[in-house]
Amino acid sequence: MKRLLVVAIIALVSISAKAQKNNSLALDTTSSVNGNYQLHEIVNIDALKKDQLYKNAKLYFMDVFAGAKDAFQYDDKQEGRIIGKGFLMVDDYKSVFPGVAVLKWDVYYNTEIICKDGKYSVRVYDIVITREGHVAENNYRNVHLTLKDAYDAIPKQRGPYKELYTKVINKMIGELNANISTLNESMAKKQSDYAAF
């Protein structure tokens, strides 16, 4: 009987630890400038010159952003700098009795790429949630929440939405990091990597 009790306690502790790990915020590892969270990387690619990196950045924007012409906010080849506006929708759910709670966010963000000989920097910033949906309650509303606002709003959420806020923030940061990974792959391409037509 004691052995069964010890096994049950160990199982509960490990479940609790896993739940705490799942609820930790990726935001804690995201940099903040003037109170605004952003993602930023500087990448060295010694083999590529500024012009090739700039071309790769343009192709990335055209491949990834729908309506790329509208996505460009700033484009200066001489400076090697491009700023584009991106959009993503993130959501997650939690089973609750008698149904499911779903949180959906429409998120806009800027991506800035600055190219120089042998290196570039990428920065994702001005991340703003513009629409929030609590699907289980069939409630959609226009909002203007920065990542800091969303983070600060977690304690004010009720029921399953407290956990969903954390999950959706983590999912959003994960998707933005995935976009940066895709960019890094695109930026590493050499002229010879492009197929001739």
Image (cartoon, rainbow, N blue to C red):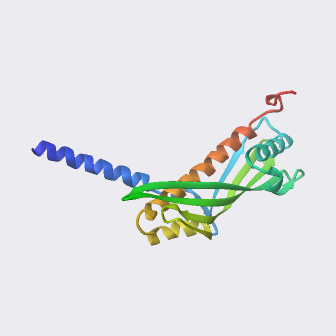
Callout count: 0
Q: Is residue 41 shown left or right of residue 20?
A: right
Q: Quadrant of residue 43?
A: top right
When the figure is inspected, residue 44 is found, relative to residue 146, above or below; the finding is above
Residue in the image at 42% along x and 62% along y: 160
Res. 26 visible in picture: no
When the figure is inspected, residue 169 is found, relative to residue 52, above or below; the finding is below
Q: Quadrant of the N terminus?
A: top left
Residue, far left: 1
Task: Pinpoint residue 146: horizontal percent, then vertical percent.
Answer: 61, 67
Q: Is residue 50 shown left or right of residue 135?
A: right
Task: Pinpoint residue 5: horizontal percent, then vertical percent.
Answer: 15, 47
Task: Pinpoint residue 128: horizontal percent, then vertical percent.
Answer: 65, 64
Q: Nearer the viewer, residue 103 or 9?
A: 103
When the figure is inspected, residue 126 is found, relative to residue 181, above or below; the finding is below
Q: Nearer the viewer, residue 29 or 128?
A: 128
Residue in the image at 58% along x and 65% along y: 132
Residue, far right: 78
Q: Quadrant of the C terminus?
A: top right
Res. 3 visible in picture: yes
Q: Is residue 96 shown left or right of residue 138?
A: left
Task: Pinpoint residue 84: horizontal percent, then vertical percent.
Answer: 77, 55
Q: Quadrant of residue 97?
A: bottom left
Q: Is residue 3 shown left or right of residue 55?
A: left
